[in-house]
Amino acid sequence: MRKMDSPLSGSKEGVLVAIESEQFNLYIKGKQPEFTKLSEEDLAYYELSSEALINVSIAGVYEEKASALSLKAAPLFFEQTAYEIVIEEMGEEKITFDHDSPLIRNKVTPLGKRRKMQTGVINFGNEVGLSEFRILVGGSLALRFVLEVYPTKLSYKADYWKLQEEITEELYNLAYDFMKQTYQSVGLQSKSRVSLTEFFSIYKIQFKHLKEAISLITYRPYHQLIEEVEIQDFREGMPMGKKGIYYLNKHPNQLIKGPLGLSAKKVLVTRKQHTVDIYENQVVKFMLEQILRKLKSVKLAYLKLDREKDEQVLTFLNEQIMYMEQQLESHFFRSISKLNRPMQFSLVIQMSPIYRKFYKIYLALQRGLSLSSDIFQISYKNVAELYEYWCFIKLGALLRKYHPLKGNDVIKADSKGLYVSLKKGKTSTLSFIHSKTGETFSLSYNRSFNSNPTVSQKPDNMLLLQKEMSGITYHYVLDAKYKLDYEEVDGQRIEVPRKEDINTLHRYRDAIVSSLGEKRYEQVVFGGVILFPGGQEQAYTTHDFYQSIAKVNIGGLPFLPAHTQLVETFLEDLVEGTGHSQYSHLPLTIGTKDYLEDLNIATKNVLIAPVKSAHQLSASLENRLYHMPQSALKVLNKQIETIVLYEPKGKEGLLPDGGIRYEGKVKSAKAVPRKELRNLFPMTKDNEEEIYIVYEVSKWKERKHILRSTRYSPVRKPRYSNTTLLTYAQTLPELYIKDELEFNLILQLRRTLDQLTTGIDEHEKLEMTIGNVKIKVNDALKIIVTTSDETRVFEKELFERRPRVLYDWIKSKSNKGVI
C-alpha cells in the first residue's frame, strides 16, 4: 500500500496524455494530487479508437503508434484536480472538442486570430469513473479517448465500491423489514408488479449472489427429524419399543405361544430419519420455479423484439435458464414436494442468514427496487453524494444492530411495487425502539429547520433521542462531509476534518432553536460531529477534534466502510446515556452554573418520616399532619417542602415489606409541646413539655410507585432527601443518593443492566449490586466496582464521557459466571 502521507512520485506538472495526428494534436496537462489513497494494485482504464494510425503517449505507461488501444495502467486523473486541455489544428478542417458534460465541453475554447488553438482548464469535481473525450474533424468523429477518474479521499477498491455495496445491502434489509410488516398477514402470492425489463436488470446484478445462496441452501439445508411407522414380520432380536408393545396389546392375534414363551408374527417398527421436505424448502423450490418462469418470459419477449439480437444476451439467458432447470432437476429439489399452502414468513426464513439472503434477492426480483428511479442502473459518479447517502444508510444500520427498527419512510410502496425514496434535498427518517427501555428515537436525513428567527438550517443527518423520565428531545447533528485536511500528529500525517466544517457544527447548535413563546427561544442541539472519509481511527483519537467531543460535544469522527468503530461507539454512548448524561459535556452560558447549583440534589427539601404503628399512620393521614421531636430536626423547617411516610417492615396494618407509599406537600409548620398532641397521638413516655414540630400537609396522596425497602434500608429516625431524587427513585435506598455522580450512575446502570438491586451500607452510603458485583461511589468521587476476586476503580471523568466502559466491564464479568 502506498503511504497516504507521502507525495506520489508523479506529482510534478507535465503532459499526461499526448495524441498527435496529421489533422490535430491533443494534449492534456496536469499533475496528480499530493495525497491520495492509491495502492500499488490500483489500475485505471484507458481506451482509444481513431480513424487513422496516430502517435499516443500516456505518461509513463504507453507510447506507441496505434489506431485502437485498451489498457489498464497507473491512474493519472483524479477528482477535484485541474487539468489543462490543449488542441492544435494541423490541417484545414475545423476541429471540435466534445464531451457529454457541458461543464467540461464549454471550458475548451479557441484562441488567437487564426483560431487554430483551443485550450481550457477542466475539473472533474467530485465525479469519478469513466470519462469520454471526443474530437470531431469537419463534423465527423475522428478520435474517441476514454480515461478513468479516481477518487482521492477514498480507496477505489476498498471504499468506493464498498459504499455502493453497503447501500444496496442495507436498502434490501429495509425493504425486507417493510415487506415483513406489510405482507406478513396476507402472504406474498400476489402477481408480480415488476416489469420484465426491471426483472432482467436486477437479475443481471444479483444472479451471482442468488447462485451462492442456492448453493448454501443445498449444502446446508434446514431439515427436520421425522418418525416413520411400518408393520414388518418379526425377527429374532428385533427391538420392540413402546409403540411396538402398544401395537401388540391392541392386536393380540399377532402373538404366538411357543415352547419358549410368547412370540409374534407381525410387529410395529418405528424409524427416525432426517428430511428436507419441509415448508421452508418447499418455499425455496417455489421461488426457483417462479424465477425460471420469468427468465423464460424474458427470453421469449426478447426474441419477439423487432431489432437485431445481441448474442451475448441470448447466451446469458440460455445459461441461466439451464442452470435453474438443472437445480430443479437435482436430487435435492426432486425430493421436495410442491408448495401446497399460501406463502408466509416463517421463523427460519426470518432468522436463518442463508434463507434470509435468498428471500431478499427473490423479494427484489419480484417487487422491484429503485433509488431515484433504479438503484441498479444509477451511476454513482458523484462520490460526494454517494458518501452522503452511505453515511445515512450506515448510521441506520449501526443503530439497527442493537435496536429494532420501528418504521421508515426510506422504503415505500406504490402501484408499481417497492421504491426507495432516499433523495438529496428530501427528508427521510428511520425510527427505532430502544431494545431495553422501550424509548423511541429517530435518525433523519436532510431534515429542514425552518422556524429559526434568522436562517433555516438543514444538516445532513440528525439523531433525535427521547429518554425515559424526560420530556426533552435531544438533537445531535451527524454531518457528512466528503472533505479532508491533513495534520501532523505524533510524527504521523493523518486525515482530519476541515476547521470550517467543525465551525458549521457550532453554527447549527446556535442557529437551530425552538420557540418558548413571548419572543424567547431555546437551543435544542446538544452537540454534533463531522463524519469525514478518514481511515486512521487509532491515530486520530489523540487529535483535538476527537478530544473536543468529550469536552464540548463538538468534533469529528472518521467514517468509512472498514472504519466505523469510533462512530458506532459514539452512537451507543448517546443512545445508552441517560437524559442527565446528555448535559455532562454541554458548555454552559456564563452564570448558568451558579443558577443550577440551587437545583442540585444536595438541597434537602424532602423529609423521610418514619411511622411506628398503624394507628400513627391512620391519624397522620386523617388529620393531614406529621409530628416529630424538634431535637431530631437536622435542617431548617423552611427547607422541608415534601414529607414521605416510611412504614417499617413487619408491623401489623402497615406495608408487609416496608416502604414509602404516601407523600404530601407541606402547608405549614409550628412548634408545640408534646402534650398538645396527646388526643391524636397517645403518649408512650413522660415527655409532655418536649417541643415537637407539627407539619400540616395540604393533602396526602398515594404514590403510583411504592418505594420498597430493601434488607439494607430500614428508616428508624427521620432522614432527608430531595424532590429530584423522589421523582426518579424506584427503590427507597435511592433517596439516600449524596451527589450527582451517584445519581447519574444509578440511572445509567438501571437503563443498561438487568437485576440491579440497591441498599444502604453502615455509613448510609448507597450501594448497588448486580449479582456478585458491588458498585459504590467513594468520598473522592471514584466509582469502586468489586467482584469476589477483583476490585476496579473507574474515574468520574471516564464514566461521564464513556459510560459503556463501566457496564461493558460488568457484562464481561457476567460472561465469566460472576453475575
Image: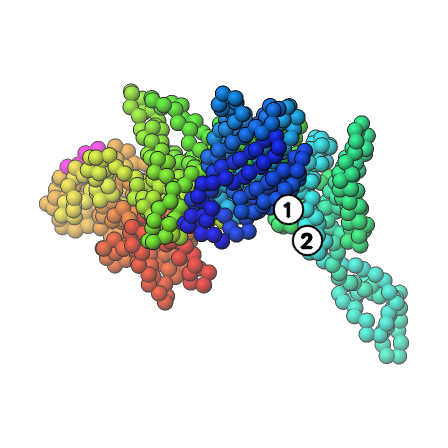
Expressed as whole percent of the image width and height from the top left, the position of residue 247 reads 81, 63
**Colouring style:** rainbow
What residue is shown at x 78% (from left), y 63% (from top)?
Answer: 271
**The image quarter in which residue 202 lies:** top right
Task: Determine if the magenta segment contains residue 406.
Answer: no
Does residue 683 appear to the left or right of 124 in the view shown?
A: left
Expressed as whole percent of the image width and height from the top left, the position of residue 198 reads 69, 33
Q: 263 or 395, which lies in front?
A: 395
What residue is shown at x 33% (from left), y 41% (from top)?
Answer: 553
**Quadrant showing the C terminus:** bottom left
Q: Identify the residue position indicated by label 2 in the image.
A: 216
Q: Amino acid at mark 1?
A: Lys
What residue is shown at x 24% (from left), y 34% (from top)?
Answer: 589
Task: Answer whether residue 101 is visible to the viewer in this image.
Answer: no
The answer to whether mark 1 and mark 2 are in CB contact below 8 A is: yes
Say if 790 sits above or below 7 in the image: below
The alpha-carbon separation of the residues under discs 1 and 2 comes to 10 Å
